[in-house]
Amino acid sequence: MRFSPVLFPSLALLLAACSPKQPAAAPAPAAAPAPAAATGSASAPVAGPRVIDLVVGDNMKFSLKTITASPGEELTVNLTSNGTLPKEAMAHNFVLLGKDVDSDAFMQSAATAKATDYIPPELADQVLAHTKPLGPRQHDTITFKVPAVPGEYEYVCTFPGHALQGMRGMLIVK
Ligand SMILES: [Cu+2]
């Protein structure tokens, strides 16, 4: 009996130590809703690449002389040929060149690069984007990211002689 006063306080301490509020572990499940929020935002409308329809043909012109775009914007170029002449005699492509590329020098090399679709392999690093050469009623689509640096980027048809006859245009990034 004499020890009981001592025993009781220690028991009380023990109980207090064992019955601590367990909620400390509770915050963990709270993290679960995060992924749900992420999938929710994915269902929101997402803007895809802006589509540019470009028509080429026997007149050796691009239907658009200029294309204006924002830096870093994604563009899809739909190139369609409504030409009638055989592909061997007249093919058309869309080749977007880097900012400070000498387009005349590029075209000179391209003219002899038939085996690689008129893209000279040694100058491939000067090309930002390009389609394949199209014959009559053919079609090709490319998607690319507009350069982040504002300025003017020339696009040309690299089939021999075409750019010299005016088959060229300008992508204006601003
Ligand atoms: Cu052409």
Image (tube, rainbow, N blue to C red):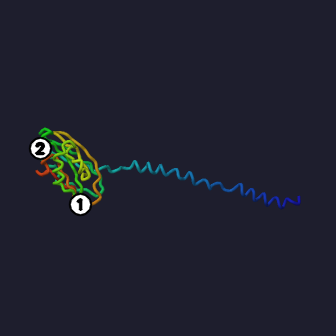
Identify which residue, 152 or 79, lies in the foreground.
152
Q: Amino acid at mark 2?
A: Asp
Q: Position of residue 135 (x, y in %)?
A: 17, 40
Name which of mark 2 and mark 1 comes first in the sequence.
2
The label shown at residue 58 is 2
Q: Residue furthest right?
A: 1
Residue neighbourhood size for the residue with mark 1, other residues' Cα within 10 Å, grouped as few (<14), some (14–19), many (≥20): some
Asked if residue 53 lies left or right of residue 11, the reply is: left
Asked if residue 36 lies left or right of residue 87, the reply is: right
Identify which residue, 29 or 109, lies in the foreground.
109
Q: Position of residue 13 (x, y in %)?
A: 75, 59
Q: Residue at x 32, y 49 (%)?
A: 48
Q: Are marks 2 and 1 in contact (CB under 8 Å)?
A: no
Q: Which residue is mark 1?
A: 151
Identify which residue, 136 or 34, lies in the foreground.
136
Q: SS of the residue at dot 2?
A: loop
Q: Residue at x 25, y 44 (%)?
A: 141
Q: Position of residue 2 (x, y in %)?
A: 88, 60
Question: Is residue 138 placed above or below 130 in the rendered structure?
Answer: above
